[in-house]
Image: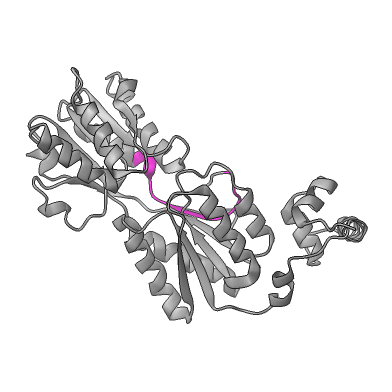
Amino acid sequence: MKSVNIKELARELKLSISTISKALHDSHEISAKTKKIVLDAAAKFNYIPHPYASSLRGKKSKTIGVVIPEVADSFFSLAINGIESVAKEKGYHVLIYLSHESFENEKNILQQFRGGRVDGVLISVSRETIKSDHINDLIADGIPLIFFDRVCDDVDTAKITTDDFESGYRAAEHLLKKQCRRIAFLSISYSLSISNKRLEGYLQAHQDYKIPADKKMIVYCPDDAKKNYTVIKKLLQQKNRPDAIIASVEKLTAPVYKACELLKLNIPKDIKVICFSNLVTASILNPSLTTITQPAFDMGKTAAKLLFRKLEKKNVSLKKENIVIPSTLIARSSTTG
């Protein structure tokens, strides 16, 4: 008889994967009646637990997995330093995996983790991630998972973020106070929570200052440096080109500066620029770059501390842990010169 996995068993019983997992592990959170229903169904439908998960239960790999979309962004480099500062104290190894902004890569990485390779996971999701079944499946297997920076709002676990809405608002407000009236917003995703919250802040600032936001100024950039340069150059060549740009991620900084240089647009005289960035070189760019600087190290460190608290005390719940660490607007010559 063909065996079923935990997802299929949950679907058959119309229960959550988490409930099925807890019932199979004799959790005190599940009633005796529900446990019996689950165990009877597991026998009936030939449920076979993951071959590695069963053998490794109760043992420690002394390793945590960190899944990030890229390492070129200085935010993630700093966040990893924060994570490793905690892991080292705890005697743990850190395995770093790159999704390269691919949902399929992310799914495959988490599938590997289900084999017991890691004791817990810290993740910042890819720009393509709109579904969260692969994440819920991992949590249902008993592996604690915490989001940092990029999150899935519908997954019931801890999230360590910055104040993205407020940061988007502050960036737009800073430019509106400089009398900018055609402010472009460069995004990288239609679905990423952080991108949408930053955009919402940008739109709210326009509304509060009674300056209509032009939808043509909201531009979505692909995951390709050359294409981004082309998109930004085209934007700056419009008849009613923007008089300011907010780049929602760090990697858009270079194509903005490069396009302005090619088109002989002076920053900040012709166009003002703000970027969400942790670049240590922001102050020595020409002109120096105004940034929304995220608390990357602190976010990584906080996420790791919370994960180890869960690993050390199994009864710790991650469901209601939503920690927001504020970002900082640092005004430099690209908007103030």
**Left or right: 78 in relation to 47:** left
**Picture residue at 10% right of the left edge, 43% below the top:** 333
User: Would you identify the image quadrant in which residue 77 lies?
Assistant: bottom left
For the C terminus, the image quarter is top left
Between 258 and 288, the one nearer to me in the picture: 258
Is residue 155 magenta-colored?
yes
Q: At which x and y percent is residue 88? A: 42, 78
For the N terminus, the image quarter is bottom right
**Left or right: 97 in relation to 216:** right
**Residue placed farthest to the bottom in the image?**
91
Q: At which x and y percent is residue 234? A: 23, 27
Between 204 and 113, the one nearer to me in the picture: 113
**Picture residue at 34% right of the left edge, 50% below the top:** 326
**Picture residue at 31% right of the left edge, 52% below the top:** 294
Q: Where is 157 relative to 118, above or below?
A: above
Between 331 and 131, the one nearer to me in the picture: 131
Q: At which x and y percent is residue 82? A: 37, 67
Q: Is residue 143 visible?
A: no
How was this image coloured?
A: one colour
**Left or right: 196 in relation to 179:** right
User: Would you identify the image quadrant in which residue 265 lies?
Assistant: top left
Q: Is residue 77 visible?
A: yes
**Left or right: 138 in relation to 37:** left
Is residue 309 magenta-colored?
no
User: Would you identify the image quadrant in which residue 235 lies?
Assistant: top left
Total labels: the figure holds 0
Q: At which x and y percent is residue 215? A: 34, 21
**Picture residue at 32% right of the left edge, 63% below the top:** 78
Give the residues drawn in magenta, as a range.
Answer: 154-166
